[in-house]
Image (tube, rainbow, N blue to C red):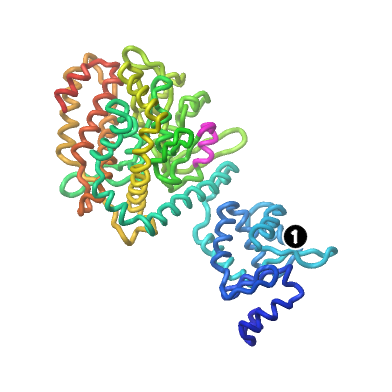
């Protein structure tokens, strides 16, 4: 085709193709010309389509797709056995890509069966090879991590798809809704978020949804600094756990509100593509697939979290995961890791709630170590909460909150996506915005100090039944909530918002009260404090 194009005009080339005896069997997808079956000649190139097809194959099949494409690029034509051997060499273990090469032929047009019945062979169309080679070079520049289990290898393909979902959402946002999102962000704040949730769920159960959405802001893991010198104190990222009696709205807050629910007509409020729902997944499976998420920031949504602790030996690896530490796990049949886990959890689980305090339904005595590494909130089905849940359920059935959600949820989600992209320096947005840090304020420290003093003054026990990590969680909560103010300040530092500080200290006092088995007067402490 290239030689013909050099000596013929476009019109002559088109006439020649129309009378070709093979026009009904073959196509041509070059850089400048395209010929479809039936001899349909088009004065446009197809390499962009070829590149996208190759990227999709790599997303769907990972290393196996790469190995087969590499083998086809490097041979002019060869029997299937030779191509399989060459692909196996590139993949590092034996491959028999019969189905995959058929997919390349039938779905993508990147492989042809040539030769005779007696001596069949396979080939890749020569005109597409430069475009294929270009994408393979991109893949080689960022090779997938070494994954030791088939579960992690399969999961890595899902990781690529989820990241593509986020990228596509961000790309559309940047092209079509960037100005509107920044404008929305200038009016958005902790107060605005709280008012939105008050309208949806009332004054009692809104707090669970506030925690859930704030955790989505926290996942970008922004630096939190203190003092005039800007010394790093911590990062915003935290693990969230809602626990308590069944039927108190825990799953709705951690899963349906974030991922969306078609059944209840609730739009998603969480980050697109970055929340991995773990329904039906065993803890051993999670530890294996977690290897595919190295150096990535995802959020694992786990309902019925206590089921994970029916298996012995799960506390230690999960504790390491929540500390974002290095995980190594061995069984009789396989070894996982070591690998560093860099993602987060949003979980819920049932407990036996008593008149005072609660009792976990997990038999492992070390489960407290897990709870200590999460931002936890107890769900007690009080008369007041039952009334609010009942009202909320009726309103959902009537579609009242959904009308409000339709107007706000997409904008909130875009704001969340844009803040995450800026803070993680996503290449689609890196040149347009600069990342920021959260600045701890004297007000935050003073409130927290006053809260601690009041609790200790009223505490009826000699020992303190909660750890210093609880103060750290409160600071992370206030800092993450303050990211809603991202576009409200021109500075590179976002001060902790006063409303966010009060909400975080309220959480601190209420959680300390639960951990202390209600050993101090909650209402009195909150009244003196806020």
> Residue at position x 44%, y 39% from top?
259
| Residue plotted at (51% across, 37% down) | 287
Horizontally, residue 365 falls left or right of residue 119, namely left
Q: Position of residue 270 (x, y in %)?
A: 39, 41
Residue 287 located within the stretch drawn in magenta: yes
The foreground one among 169 and 277 is 169
Identify the residue at the far front of this view: 398
**Above or below 523: residue 332:** below
**Furthest residue to the right?**
118
Badge 1 marks a residue whose secondary structure is helix
Label 1 Cα crowd, 10 Å radius (few <14 / some 14-19 / many 20+): some
- Residue furthest toward the bottom? 7
Tell whether position 93 is magenta. Answer: no
257 or 370: nearer the viewer:
257
The quarter of the rendered structure image containing the N terminus is bottom right
| Residue 80 at least partly seen | yes
Label 1 belongs to which residue?
A: 80
Instruction: Residue 49: name its quadrant.
Output: bottom right
x and y percent of residue 228 in the render? Answer: 15, 48
Q: Which quarter of the rendered picture does the C terminus lie within?
A: top left
Instruction: Judge left or right: residue 184 versus residue 145.
Output: left
Which region shows up in magenta?
A: 279-290
Q: Residue at x 82, y 66 (%)?
A: 116
Q: Which residue is at the far top?
A: 355
Residue 412 locus on image (x, y percent): 34, 44
x, y percent for residue 33: 60, 75
Q: Specify the principal SS of the magenta part.
A: helix
- Residue 176 falls in image quadrant: bottom left
Q: Is residue 185 left or right of residue 132?
A: left
């Amino acid at each position: 085709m290239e030689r013909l194009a050099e000596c013929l005009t476009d019109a002559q080339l088109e006439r020649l193709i129309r009378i070709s005896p093979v026009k009904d069997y073959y196509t041509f997808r070059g850089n400048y010309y395209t010929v479809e079956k039936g001899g349909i000649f088009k004065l446009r190139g197809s390499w962009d389509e070829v590149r996208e097809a190759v990227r999709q194959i790599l997303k769907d099949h990972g290393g196996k797709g790469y190995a087969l494409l590499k083998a086809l690029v490097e041979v002019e034509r060869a029997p299937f056995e030779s191509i399989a051997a060459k692909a196996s060499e590139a993949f590092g273990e034996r491959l028999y890509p019969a189905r995959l090469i058929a997919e390349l032929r039938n779905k993508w047009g990147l492989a042809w069966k040539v030769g005779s019945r007696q001596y069949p062979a396979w080939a890749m169309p020569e005109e597409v090879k430069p475009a294929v080679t270009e994408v393979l070079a991109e893949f080689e520049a960022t090779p997938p991590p070494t994954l030791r289990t088939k579960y992690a290898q399969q999961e890595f393909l899902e990781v690529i798809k989820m990241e593509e979902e986020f990228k596509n959402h961000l790309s559309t946002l940047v092209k079509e809704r960037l100005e509107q999102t920044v404008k929305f962000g200038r009016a958005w704040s902790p107060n605005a978020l709280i008012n939105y949730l008050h309208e949806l769920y009332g004054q009692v159960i809104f707090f669970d949804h506030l925690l859930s959405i704030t955790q989505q802001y926290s996942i970008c893991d922004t630096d939190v600094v203190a003092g005039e010198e800007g010394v790093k104190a911590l990062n915003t990222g935290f693990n969230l756990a809602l626990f308590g009696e069944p039927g108190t709205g825990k799953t709705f807050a951690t899963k349906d509100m974030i991922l969306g629910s078609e059944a209840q007509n609730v739009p998603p409020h969480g980050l697109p593509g970055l929340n991995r729902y773990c329904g039906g997944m065993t803890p051993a499976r999670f530890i294996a697939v977690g290897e595919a998420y190295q150096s990535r920031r995802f959020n694992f949504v786990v309902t019925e979290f206590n089921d994970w602790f029916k298996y012995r030996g799960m506390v230690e690896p999960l504790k390491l995961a929540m500390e974002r530490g290095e995980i190594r796990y061995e069984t009789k049949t396989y070894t996982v890791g070591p690998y560093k886990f860099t993602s987060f959890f949003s979980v819920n689980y049932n407990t036996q709630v008593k008149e005072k305090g609660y009792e976990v339904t997990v038999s492992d005595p070390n489960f407290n170590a897990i709870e200590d590494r999460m931002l936890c909130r107890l769900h007690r089905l009080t008369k007041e909460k039952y009334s609010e849940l009942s009202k909320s359920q009726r309103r959902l059935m009537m579609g009242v909150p959904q009308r409000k959600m339709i107007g706000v949820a997409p904008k909130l989600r875009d704001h969340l996506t844009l803040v995450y992209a800026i803070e993680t320096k996503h290449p689609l947005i890196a040149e347009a915005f600069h990342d920021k840090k959260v600045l701890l304020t004297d007000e935050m420290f003073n409130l927290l100090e006053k809260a601690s003093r009041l609790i200790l003054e009223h505490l009826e026990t000699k020992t303190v039944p909660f750890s210093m990590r609880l103060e750290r969680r409160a600071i992370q909560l206030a800092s993450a909530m303050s990211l809603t103010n991202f576009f409200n300040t021109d500075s590179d530092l976002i001060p902790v918002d006063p409303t966010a500080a009060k909400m975080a200290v309220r959480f601190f006092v209420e959680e300390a009260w639960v951990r202390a088995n209600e050993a101090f007067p909650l209402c009195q402490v909150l009244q003196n404090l806020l």
